[in-house]
Amino acid sequence: MIEIPPKLAEYHRRHADDSGPEWTAVLPGLVERFVDDWDLRLDGPPMHGVVSLVLPVRRGDGSPAVLKLQPLTEEHATEAPGLRAWDGDGIVRLLDEATVPGSSRHEANALLLERLDGGRSLETHPDIGEALEILGGLLARLVAHPAPEGMRRLGDIARDMLERVPGAMRQVGPEEARWLDRCAGAVRELAGEPGDRLLHWDLHFDNVLAAEREPWLAIDPKPLAGDPGFELLPALRNRWVSVADGLRRFDRLTEMLALDRRRALGWTLGRVLQNMLWDIEDEQDLNEVELALAEALLQRQ
């Protein structure tokens, strides 16, 4: 019987809409089921994200892998199809996948993945510039793939954001409302051409791990069909240095991905809008780093 890490159980309580204590309770049984079904043996201490449990394992032939168990929420539903479409091109390879009707509110999703080095990410790379080059190279490979059928679509997400803006504006002061209006305006200009590339949606330095098959590979995608400009913000703000550095990163990433900078700016403002809406709904302060970067990008334009 596996013991669920206390911090993961606390995350489950805190994020009850996506998991909850009942998800914590069913996890040990799911581990036993998939260790048996896939002929695995545990091979190290458990790791975890916010709702997912990740276990180092050995397959029947002795090869290393990881078993990832997560509730099949909207956020996680496209992970396996996206990984199949990428087939290891710049990202962790999917070895097997199954969905189990859950006794909790969500179905359970099990992924058997290529094992990477969970102790080495670009978050701790000593050279931020080199780390950005690595991340940008992976991102360029990922967005080169067309999105398969069944992905969530950026056009739908953009429309949903725009519908939520009026309600959000009634909850905030004049300065926050001004930012909502500016970012919503940028999204309106682009919403009719949302793109069709396969996006990772959350590629920042901590989601790139050292590997054996290649020096570095991406992990933990939230696949989405859309414009690659929507991918940039996590890498611009991660390991934040300054506004000037953020602008340099924007220029370098748009160059590496061969993006139209006007569209990339608009979708970056769309990403800022998405985060603002989440912050307002959670009654959190708006992200000052994102707003400072957005202001600098707009002024330069």
Image (cartoon, helix red, strand yellow):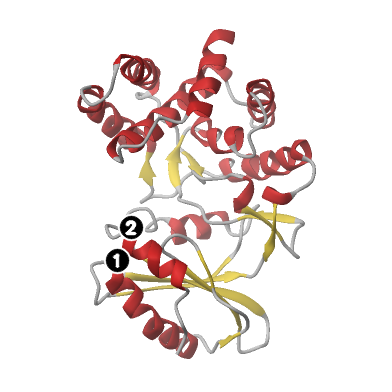
Residue 301 visible in the picture: no
Q: Secondary structure at mark 1?
A: loop
Q: Residues within 10 Å of mark 2 (few under 14, many from 20)?
A: some
How far across and down, in percent of the image, does residue 193 sit?
A: 40, 25
Circle 2 sits on which residue?
15
Residue 59 visible in the picture: yes
Instruction: State how far apart marks 2 and 1 are (Cα).
Output: 6 Å
Residue 20, disc: 1
Left or right: 264 in relation to 34: right
Query: Residue at left 58%, top 19%?
Result: 261
Q: Name the kind of residue labelled 2 in the image.
A: His
Above or below, comparing residue 1 to residue 175 in the picture: below
The answer to whether mark 2 and mark 1 are in CB contact below 8 A is yes
Q: Residues within 10 Å of mark 1 (few under 14, many from 20)?
A: some
Left or right: 114 in relation to 151: right
| Mark 2 or mark 1, earlier in chain | 2
Q: Secondary structure at mark 2?
A: loop
How far across and down, in percent of the image, does residue 18 sit?
A: 31, 59
Would you identify the image quadrant in which residue 214 lies? bottom right
Residue 187, disc: none
The quarter in which the C terminus is drawn is top right
Q: Nearer the viewer, residue 174 or 67?
A: 174
Q: Nearer the viewer, residue 194 or 66?
A: 66
Query: Residue at left 60%, top 32%?
Result: 236
